[in-house]
Amino acid sequence: MRPISDECNRQIKKCLEDCLSVRKVASLTKVSIGRVQKTRSSMSSLGNFNKRGRPSKLSARQKQYIVRSITKDGNDNAVQVKEALKNDLGIDISERTVRRQLRAAGLVLFVKPKKAMLSERNRKKRLEWAIDHKDWTLDDWKRVIWTDETKVNRFGSDGQAYAWKRSEENLQKRHVKQTLKYGGGNIMVWSCITWEGVGFIVDVGKNMNKEIYLDTLKEDLNNTMDEYGMDKSKLIFMQDNDPKHKSALVMDWLSKQPFKCMEWPPQSPDLNPIENMWALLERRLFKNYETFPAGINDLWERIADTWYDITKEECQKYIETMPDRVKEVLKAKGSWTKY
């Protein structure tokens, strides 16, 4: 590379310190881009050159405002922050600039998970429950029978579905969530999980009432305990606070059983490991079959076959998370957990 004069070298450095681009400096000083890049690298290695690029449009105070508007002021997205900046500070910047600043501050964008609505009373009840169970060992949790109902649709989940495709590719069968004009029907099922595996599963109909629920407990809950040869006097029965579960008819029967009943905090599906098993059931139910169920009877047969294929190790995997779930509630002071 041809040597340059000391004056030219000083000029290059001065331009670079003024944050001019390499191409601009090369044009002004009449030297090659490679020469400017070499000078720039030497300045950086000596520690006397600060790579700054284009000056930020935002002051430190304005950057703090953007972060605070998300973390403290209740704004949810870049559009809302942009409007707040314009209304409060008279600053008009793009949503892209807002997002860039949020990422620079360590915030990440994610899809909001669906969680049960929590009132202050609910939160306190959850916290009290966690405090009561903070010293429970895994052996204690092994004694619990976890129960619940869920709805299974003939054509899959009610929620959003996502898929990837190339931009130029036409929609394929795997890209769409097919629907039926009148829904296709669904089944409401009840079951339980234990440390020994899944319990009996039953179609409880679309309008399950306290009488049907009690009959389910009398038959299918008892059949599950008998199937695994469980000592009923050592078991703990868990159910949520659905009105039919807490009806006088059901509670009277439960009070006469040899097993104990667990007090359950309101709005707490995230603390019930059977919710994870329902999700597992649905994933496998619509993954393991190439075609949709021919009808409700076919759907029921698939539900039963898929449920009974779940292993006891898979049940244990989620029951083993109970100590961590309790810790999460304590850490969140009764608020939502990641489960």
Image (cartoon, grey):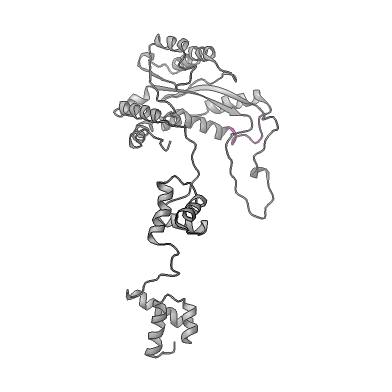
Magenta segment: does it hold 286?
Answer: yes
Characterize the magenta stretch by its predominant secondary structure: loop
Q: Which segment did they paint magenta? A: 285-294
Residue ranking furthest to the left: 135
Q: Nearer the viewer, residue 80 or 186?
A: 80
Image coords of residue 166 (percent x, y): 63, 53
Q: Quadrant of residue 6?
A: bottom left
299 left or right, relative to 103:
right
Is any part of residue 136 visible from this angle?
Answer: no
Q: Nearer the viewer, residue 107 or 205?
A: 107
Residue at figure coordinates x 35%, y 32% from the top left: 326
Is any part of residue 255 visible from this angle?
Answer: yes
Up-down relation of residue 218 to residue 122 (above or below): above
Q: Nearer the viewer, residue 223 or 127?
A: 127
Image coords of residue 287 (percent x, y): 59, 36
129 left or right, relative to 304:
left
Query: From the image, which quarter does the N terminus lie in?
Result: bottom left
Query: From the image, which quarter does the C terminus lie in?
Result: top left
Q: Quadrant of residue 316?
A: top left
Magenta segment: does it hold 130?
Answer: no
Image coords of residue 200 (percent x, y): 51, 20
Up-down relation of residue 152 to residue 250 (above or below): below
Q: Quadrant of residue 55?
A: bottom left
Image coords of residue 152 (percent x, y): 58, 28
